[in-house]
Every structure is written in C-alpha cells, then in structure tokens.
Amino acid sequence: MNGHSAFVHRQSRRDCNSHLPCRQGDGCRWCGVLRIGRGGLGAIAMAGGSYKTPMFTIAWPTGEFGGMGLEGLVKLGYRNDLAAIENPEENRAKYEEMVARAYENGKALNYGSLFTVDDTLDPADSRW
C-alpha cells in the first residue's frame, strides 16, 4: 500500500471502505489476515472487536497473531522469569527461545487450532 501507484489508485480509500459496515454498526462480515494480525488493539478493532465477531475469519499460512509485538510480550510477560537468570548469555538464550515459541504459537496454522481462525487458505486459492 506504499508508493505513487497506491496513491494514484486510491488504494487506502478502497481498503478503508471495505470496513465501512463495521463503522456503521452492522458488524464485520468477514476478516482476512494476510500477514500480521497482531499489534494490540488496532488489528482486533479492524476485525470488529474480536476475531470471533465476524461471520468468519480466514488467514493465509503466513498470517501471524498475537496481542502485541511478540518481543514486547515476552519482555513484559516474562520479565520476572528473565530477571531471575543472572547470566547474560543464558538470559538472552532464554529470551530468544521464548520469542521463537511465541512466533510458532502465533502462526495462522497453529492459531486455527484455537478456533479463532475458521480456515487457513492457500494464497493461490484466494485470488480471483
């Protein structure tokens, strides 16, 4: 959505208009996550307040989910566990392990097992 072409073709306006039913109170019809559906309230607000609010939620296999940036999630959520490790190398290794686990758990294929995503689609099957 960057660049002169997106500006000329008013891509942002067309993308925002697809969310018009949400703003009018009718509720979102559907939600699709192509890349990243995390980052706090912004992504969830665009889905209507929850990924369970729309009639269905779909994602590409490259979709990633989480309540916020996953590095920040680990730093804030596990700060006591990380502070208990005094060795800086072990601390960094544990941090990297926790971040990797958070990324793995937040992948669309894994997130679908929590019944938050209704289906994970092959990108080639979702283009018309």
Image (tube, rainbow, N blue to C red):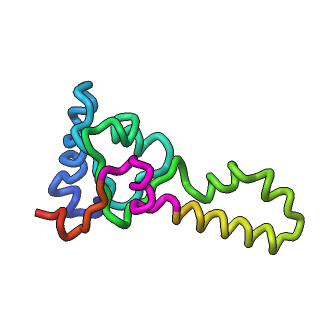
| Residue at (83, 70) in percent of width and height | 88
Q: In the depicted view, which residue is nearer to us: 43 or 107?
A: 107
> Residue 87's spot in the image, x, y percent?
87, 70
| Residue at (23, 48) in percent of width and height | 15
| Residue at (32, 57) in percent of width and height | 59
Find the magenta span and give its range.
105-118
Q: In the depicted view, which residue is nearer to us: 87 or 58?
A: 58
Q: Quadrant of residue 53?
A: top left
Asked if 93 appears above or below 83 in the picture, the reply is: below
12 vs 98, left or right, is left
> Residue 68's spot in the image, x, y percent?
54, 49
- Identify the residue at the far right of this view: 86
> Residue 20's spot in the image, x, y percent?
22, 35
- Residue 30 on the magenta span: no
Q: Quadrant of residue 110?
A: bottom left
| Residue at (39, 34) in percent of width and height | 49
Asked if 26 appears above or below 114 in the picture, the reply is: above
86 vs 71, left or right, is right
Q: In the depicted view, which residue is nearer to us: 46 or 107?
A: 107
> Residue 12's spot in the image, x, y percent?
25, 50
